[in-house]
Image (spheres, rainbow, N blue to C red):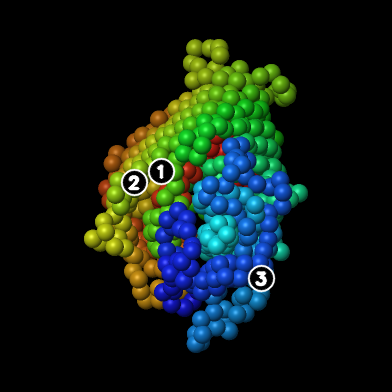
Amino acid sequence: MSPGNHANDRRSRERLISTSTKPAQRAENRASAHGRTVFALVAALLGSAAVTASTPQGLHAQVTDTTTVCESGEISNIFIDNRSIFDIVEGDPLNWVYRLANTLHIDTNEGFILREVLFSTGDCLDPLLLEESSRILESYRFITTADVYPVAQSDGTYHVVIDTQDRWTTQFDLGVSFDQGLQLDRVDLTEGNLLGRGMLAQVFARRRREQRDRGFRLQEPRLFGTRTDANFGWGRTRGGDFLEQGINYPFVGEVGRFALRQVVDRRDRVFTYSAADDPEFTNVLLAYRDEWAEISMAGRRGRPGNLTLLGAGITRERIDFGGLPSEIEVVLDGDFGSTTAASNAVRDIVSGQTRARATTRLNLMFGQRNLRFARVRGLDALDGELDVQLGTDIGLTIGRSIDLLSVDGIPSPDDLFGRVRLFAGHDPGASFVFAQVAAEGRRLRSGDDQWRDLIGEVDLYSYLRSQRIPGQTLFLRASAAGGWSVESPFQLTLGGRDAARGFREEYAPGARRILLTVEDRIFFRWPWPDLFDLGLTLFADAGRVWSGDVPYGVDSGWQGALGFGLRYSAPAGSRMGGRIDLAFPLGATTDHSPVFRVTLFELLGIGPGFSDVQLERTRRSRTGPDFLVTRLGR
């Protein structure tokens, strides 16, 4: 991010280099184009006089359909312009601050960048691989922007320039938020790009509501110099401890042909039930042990935009409610530090969701991916760019339990597991519409009441924009979620930071829920547009909860909230931002006061994703085509 005036952009470079060929259209970014222009001129005029580099052999994308004749031309040189955090603009009084930050920061290693791109010197120029390489680089949090473009040479070959800019990666995060009072959610010390080689090292302590986690985590995106991601973490939780380990060879962009995933995750968790209007306590805490292990592999055929996936694997899941200290507690007056042992009556209420089981499954996966990417500015980020998926993506998982690794005293049900997910994205004009449907459940192979742990969700997000009103987006959401015959800990609530925002998270628990949102997002290009982005938001939420068969479930009727707030992101043009909101409840009893929240992230939208936190804490099986991605562990 440059602190100065960013009037120059890619078009300046194209005017200076008449022989340049344009890659796929990208939105103009806010970083200074001075470094790009210099490197492009060097690449076009000086050729081998510049520093060149080549990708080590054997680390290309998994592309099966290669050609022997380069109709578009050959890549003769690769140039890396890896800029530090800040560009220095002459005359800026804060230059000494920017220079100090650049000096303290360790720039991303050029070898790491070269190993991430999908081409090498001697390869045929392929605009798709250049675009995919840019997207892969920008997927790393420590890279703010990545631009990969070709420069034509007089001999018919091309030089490729890889232009990146780093983000500050050493963070001491106190994680202070204001949500139902001032809270210190976390204390994190993180280095997100250790030695410039993409490794993450983190020591953390998390303390929000029932959460009391502390530990460390290490991530290596280039295990032994390959594209294999590795993850290891260990620490303590409120209920005991956790251990996570993962090795993941993901599909490489849209051109990868195979993927492999191995995960071990053992965690002593605490599930929080809202006790609704119980006069004696506000929450019930249920401690349990959650274990998950997986080995899965998959391959896909076709071309980008029309990919078919087939995969298989074996998983092991176990949930156990015995042997943990303070198995069931109640929270007094919303203070999660003040608890007491639950009575027998409370235990009877939650007993239907305390059924232990241990299951080993063989799984088959199928996926059909017909997607393209669009580079869009200002959807969930105020003025940042985001690659959004358009088209359709379907994933199906079927698992069959097998008699393997049984545990004494814990049932191993004989069942079939199914999970389906459908995604669709469409861009009618300047607007965007995204939809997702997901459902999963188990069917027992014996007994009368055969269906168990059925959970499902439907989400529809719309962004309505007009070129006549630049800087303004109308965001619409319609979401439905629910559970049926759930034997694991499960409960939804109407209130919360990503639900009906005028109510606290404990408000109106139930088994099924509908949420509707209308939000007007307005972007201001002042007061300091080169330092940070600022915007106003006006929103209305409405929702309803049905009790179902969950503990303490209620039928809420339709209720809603009105609110307003500020949205911000720093540095300017960032893809991530936060919110300051004040929401007023409607249709509730008079003892509900307005809710003021300060969060360091966007709450709703395609950027944060469709994931429902309250559903995710219930989900037992986590295998499927959409999990064979670059994230580590779970």
Secondary structure beneath dot 2 equals loop
Q: CA distance from mark 3 to mark 2?
A: 45 Å
Mark 2 nearby-residue class (10 Å; few <14, some 14–19, many ≥20):
some
- Residue under numbered circle 2: 427
Secondary structure beneath dot 3 equals helix
Counting from the top left corner in percent of width and height, residue 92 is at 50, 85
Q: CA distance from mark 3 to mark 1?
A: 42 Å
Q: Nearer the viewer, residue 633 or 195?
A: 195
Counting from the top left corner in percent of width and height, residue 522 is at 31, 63
Q: Nearer the viewer, mark 3 or mark 1?
A: 3
Q: Which mark is residue 231?
A: none
Q: What amino acid type is highlighted by mark number 2?
A: Asp
Residue 594 appearing in the image: no
Q: Residue at (45%, 36%) from the top-left corner? A: 370
- 586 left or right, relative to 125: left
Q: What amino acid type is highlighted by mark number 3?
A: Ala
Q: Residue at (51%, 28%) from the top-left corner? A: 396
- Residue under numbered circle 3: 49
Q: Nearer the viewer, residue 143 or 442?
A: 143
**For the residues bearing labels 3 and 1, Cβ distance under 8 angstroms:** no
- Residue under numbered circle 1: 390
- 220 left or right, relative to 163: right
Counting from the top left corner in percent of width and height, residue 562 is at 29, 55
Q: Nearer the viewer, residue 541 or 28?
A: 28
Q: Residue at (52%, 50%) from the top-left corner? A: 72
Of the two numbered discs 2 and 1 on the same chain, state the one appearing first in sequence. Answer: 1
Residue 464 appearing in the image: yes
